[in-house]
Image (spheres, grey):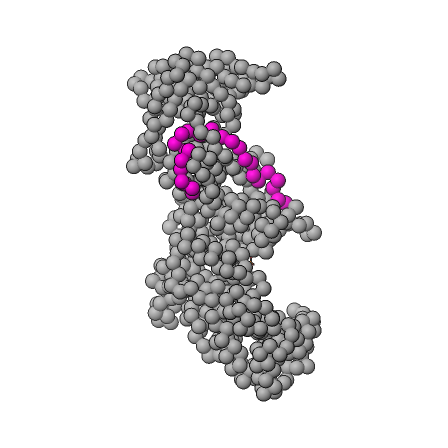
Amino acid sequence: MTDVIEKTPERSLNFIEEIVEADLASGKYTGIITRFPPEPNGYLHIGHAKSICLNFGLAKKYGGSTNLRFDDTNPTKEDVEYVDSIKEDVRWLGFQWAEERYASDYFGQLYEWAIALIKKGLAYVDDQTQEEIRTGRGAVTRPGEESPFRNRSVEENLDLFIRMKNGEFKDGEKVLRAKIDMAHPNMLLRDPILYRILHTDHHRTGHTWCIYPMYDYAHGQSDSIEHVTHSICTLEFDVHRPLYDWFIEKLEIFPSRQYEFARLNLTYTIMSKRKLLELVKSGYVRDWDDPRMPTICGLRRRGYTPESIRLFAEKVGVAKRDNVIDLSLLEWCVREDLNKRANRYMAVLKPVKVVITNYPEGQVEELDAINNPEDESAGKRKIPFSREVYIERDDFMENPPKKYFRLSPGNEVRLKYAYIIKCETVIKDALGNITELHCTYDPATRSGSENNRQVKGAIHWVSAPQAATAQVQLFDRLFTEAHMDNIPEGKDYKNFLNPDSLQTLTAFVEPALKNLPPSTHVQFERLGYFVTDKESARDNPVFNRTVTLKDTWAKVATKN
Ligand code: ATP
Ligand code: MG
């Protein structure tokens, strides 16, 4: 995968950039304004990150600006908790909005425009039940039927709509509909609902309103109020575009234009906020920021960096057709970034003790270790070495196959930054479990010394007396199925939760890892990139594995 990506030539313009450049060249606009319009009903996920990078990235590239607009037209599901988290996540990704807006700020203007539509004979109050309205719409193959209330006079409609607003009717008793065409081939234009009655407090407007605009009516007009030039949304909204344009035309307001791109799907995960909320509420994950979640706060806690997510958005590009991106691309991006910035350390996750029998008891040496071979300015540090060290259990084999270059009875291996050791005796308990390995070392082989001998294998280790313990959390994919967008009929997505997505270990780590501040990125040599958890405490560090060093899944997949 690495090769393929690195050979990709400089990207040409994506189709939205082409549109923007044409609009600027023709003088249609002198500058561009985009917006990112989340509904504050959940935490942002990697799909939103794609949209954020696209909207903010376009404005940045063409010297325009981007508004952050909360699409808060549905008071029953929205909350300030979500507003705050969304702002934090957008900032963390590295973007600054020009203005913070709320669709609810426009409720007054939207109401005025509804009155204007009624006065033009383009909207009417309908008393039908939700069910009647639904069946009256007809089907794709069959035209709808006009509501018996469709031909009310302008005066009657005005009176009823004002009374709807004044709270004279109960939820569901009446709606305001646009008067378009009940036989329109696009079902969304068969007299769409503009307003419904909801006697519910809104997180920002309180009980000022008891009628709330529908998405289609609010969204385009909000764009227009903000003079958004390019309103970018996901493909499923392409059927909404004629309605978007209809309102702009009939209201004679600023002509924002909608463009659609493919939504991001990732293998082994889900992006629906409703389902993510369910995972949190029912305790399948610990919270929205559980490091297994595809949420931005989950990725952050997992150790993803803003740079890695922006790189991912760039690599994914802007497509016009829906597709599913391989999770390994996201992992590749974070490795790319952390390789440059994460200092290397040694940690042993599944330890076995090695006693170096010819090393003087009580002696401790301070050895030089390089912090980051990719970054000379990161410098060096000292690591203690003594008679007893821990190595990974997996780095020893009692009966090794040919070409096994790690430790085995009678064989040598290098302890990185230290000496070559040779395994002399394997110590076992009464049950036959290995408890210790007794080795000898060759004092002439200290790393960095002249005329040093070479052996084929080098392994990591931690000096036992100085080692600190740390909690280490290893994560695996949240779902066992790659194409969660395509699970078999009748199966619940929860049937595919990976029962082994979290493994917690107590590891031995070198002393320098004891006191790192939360959210510090490190590489454990040979094991992967890790980050100190946001709740990691001094003397009781908690490390989350961000990603392994190599894509182990790719290998497994090709073997199968
Ligand atoms: P959900 O259906 O899970 O509630 P949503 O698409 O309704 O998600 P919004 O808060 O309305 O979520 O989305 C805000 C913006 O982010 C929209 O412009 C939407 O198109 C975009 N977006 C949401 N999900 C994705 C995705 N998977 N890929 C790209 N853009 C996305
Ligand atoms: Mg939405």
- Classify the position of the C terminus by image quarter: top right
From the top left corner, tell me how far across and down residue 215 is, in percent.
55, 68
Q: Is residue 93 left or right of residue 162?
A: left
Can you say whether 305 is above or below 262 in the image? above
Q: Residue at x 42, y 68 (%)?
A: 228
From the top left corner, tell me how far across and down residue 527 is, in percent.
46, 32
From the top left corner, tell me how far across and down residue 383 is, in percent.
37, 26
Can you say whether 210 is above or below 276 in the image? below
Q: Residue at x 32, y 31 (%)?
A: 380
Report if residue 504 lies within the magenta region: yes
In the rendered image, which quarter is residue 32 located in? bottom left
In the rendered image, which quarter is residue 373 located in? top left
Q: Residue at x 64, y 77 (%)?
A: 169
Res 173 visible: yes
From the top left corner, tell me how far across and down residue 438 is, in percent.
48, 14
Res 161 visible: no
Report if residue 441 lies within the magenta region: no
In the rendered image, which quarter is residue 151 located in? bottom right
Can you say whether 100 is above or below 290 in the image? below
Q: Relative to the observer, which residue lies in front, 478 or 99?
A: 99
Q: Which residues are magenta?
A: 496-520
